[in-house]
Amino acid sequence: MSDTVSTGQPDTILKSVSSENSINGQRAPKTLPGEFYEQYLSRAAKNRQPDAIRSLLPLEHTPGVISLLAGKPNTSTFPISSLQFTTRDPASPSSNEIQLQLSPQELAVGLQYSLTRGLPDLQEWIHGLQAISHKREKGEGWTVAIGAGSQDLIYKAVTALVNPGEAVLIEAPVYAGVLPIFQSLDCDMIEVETDAQGIRSDSLRATLESWPAAKPKPKVLYTVPYGCNPTGMTASLERRLEVLALSREHGFLILEDDPYYYLYYGSAPRPPSYFQLEREQPDVGRVVRFDSLSKVLSSGIRVGFVSAPEVIVRAMELHTMMANLQPSSLSQAIALKLLRTWGYAGFRAHTEHVSQFYREKRDVFEAALRRHLADLVEWTTPEAGMFVWFKLLGTAADGSTLENDSESIIRTKAFEHGVLALPGTVFLPSGRKTAYVRAAFSLLPPEDVDEALKRLRVAILDARASSA
C-alpha cells in the first residue's frame, strides 16, 4: 500500500462509514471505519506484533475463568500494606481536607501489573470526563488509553503515524519538548504560522495548496490549541473550524495536544476543542486528542490519556507492550481514588481554582512587565497556561537591531545578571533566529518576579551598550 494520503475519500470508504443512529437521544456522528487508517499507520506500527501474554490479559476478567496465564508476583509478598493520603476539598480548598485511604483491593490493584491501556475503572472515568468536557460519548468512533504522561502518548502516536523522513505540519512557535520526537524520525518539519488568534489557517491553506504534486502531503498536524507553550495563545473558534475543514480536504490528522485545557482563564468563553467540534463534521475520526493530569493534579504522578480512533490507540498499545508494558498501576490507583472521591463536579471546581490561580500569576507578571520592560519589549496577554511570550525591541549602540535575535542576550547577558529564560529559537522547528523570549510565571512569588524583570532590564540595556 502506498504511504501517500489521498485528499479525498474513496467511494469504498465512504460507503463503509457507519450509518447515523442515536446516542443518549442525540444524533450519532458518522465514524470513519478502521480500514481508513491503513494509509496513516507507519511501517513500524504495521510491523509491531502483540505481546503473547499481555494481549490475553483482558480474558482474565471473564467470569468463571481460572487463569494460569501471567507470571504475576503474589501481592502478599509486597511490603506496602496500606496507603493513605490527604487531599484538599475542591469545594473549599483553603480550609477543608479529606483523608483518603486505598482499600486493600484498591492497593492490590495499584501494586500489581494491569492492562496495557490502563486501569479499566480509570478508563471509564475518563470516558465520562470527555462526555462532560467535550460532549463526546462512547460509540462515536473513539476510545481512550492511559500513558505515563501525555508526552509518552504523543511519542507513541507520532511513531505510529509517521515514517522516517516524512513531512509533518507543526505550528510555530511550538512546544520545544515535541521537536526531538520529529527530529529523531528525520522528519521534514513544515512550520505553520501562528498569531494572537492561534494557528493561522490561511498559512496552513497556503502551504497545502502550493504543495508539490510529486511529494506526499503530510499525514499529521501537531498543535497546542489552548495556552500554547510557549506563546500562551488560544486558537479562536473560527480558526479551529477552518483547520478541521482543511483536515478533511487535504487528508491530515490533527494531533491536539491539550495540557492547558483546564488552565484557560481568558475573558471570553473557552472555545470548544477540536475533539468536540469534530462531532459536528460530516464524519469523525481525524482528531487524536492528548490530555494530561500533570498541570492540575501532579506532574510527578505521570498520568496522561489519549482519546482517539481505536485503530490508532491499538497501534500505540502495541508500542507500549514492547516499551514499558503499561503505565504505573499505583499512580493510576491514587489518581482514580482522588477523582472518584471528588466526582466530576469536584474535579471541575478544582480545575477552576487552578485556572484562577494562574490567572492571578499572569496578572502579577504582566504588571511587572509594564513596570520594568514596557519600553523594551512587546507582548500579547496570554489567555491560558503558564507563559508570557515577548519580543525584544530597540537598537544596539552599534546600530544593529535587537529584533533580529534574542538568543545571545538571553543565554549570555541575562544569565550573567542572574535571570534565566528561554530564547524563542528553541521553539521553532527551523531553529531560525527570532527576537522572542519565553518566560514562565508559574512558580515565582511576586517579589521574585519583580526582581527577575529588573535584572532582565539591566541585561537588555547592557547588551545594547556592550555591542558598541
Image (cartoon, grey):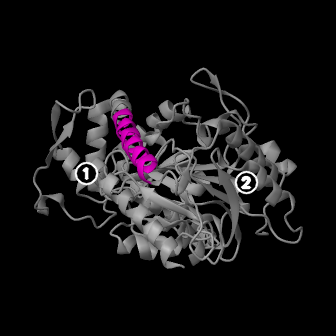
Q: Say which quadrant the N terminus sits in.
A: bottom right
The answer to whether residue 365 is left or right of residue 446 is right
Q: Is residue 145 magenta?
A: no
Q: Which mark is residue 442?
A: none
> Residue 388 at x, y = what percent?
48, 52
Identify the main secondary structure in magenta. helix
Q: Nearer the viewer, residue 113 or 183?
A: 183
Q: Is residue 114 above or below residue 70?
A: above
Q: Which residue is mark 2?
A: 36
Q: Nearer the viewer, residue 246 or 144?
A: 246
Q: Say which quadrant the C terminus sits in.
A: bottom right
Query: Which residue is drawn at the image coordinates 44% and 45% (left, top)?
Result: 366
Q: What residue range appears in magenta?
A: 351-372
> Residue 206 at x, y = what percent?
82, 56
The answer to whether residue 376 is left or right of residue 239 is left
Identity, as a three-letter code, of the amino acid under mark 2? Phe
Q: Is residue 6 visible?
A: no
1 or 2: tag closer to the N-terminus: 2
Query: Which residue is drawn at the image coordinates 48% and 78% (left, top)?
Result: 466
Query: Which residue is drawn at the image coordinates 89% and 67% (left, top)?
Result: 213
Q: Is residue 154 above or below residue 256?
A: below
Question: Based on the displayed image, in which of its 4 quarters is residue 2 positioned?
Answer: bottom right
Identity, as a three-letter code, of the amino acid under mark 1? Val
> Residue 48 at x, y = what percent?
56, 71
Q: How many marks?
A: 2
Q: Which mark is residue 109?
A: 1
* Separation (CA) of disc 1 from disc 2: 37 Å
User: Dot 1, how many residues are within 10 Å of its Cα: few (below 14), some (14-19), or many (20+)?
Assistant: some
Q: Is residue 354 magenta?
A: yes
> Residue 9 at x, y = what percent?
82, 50
**Residue farthest toward the right in the current orientation of the protein:** 213
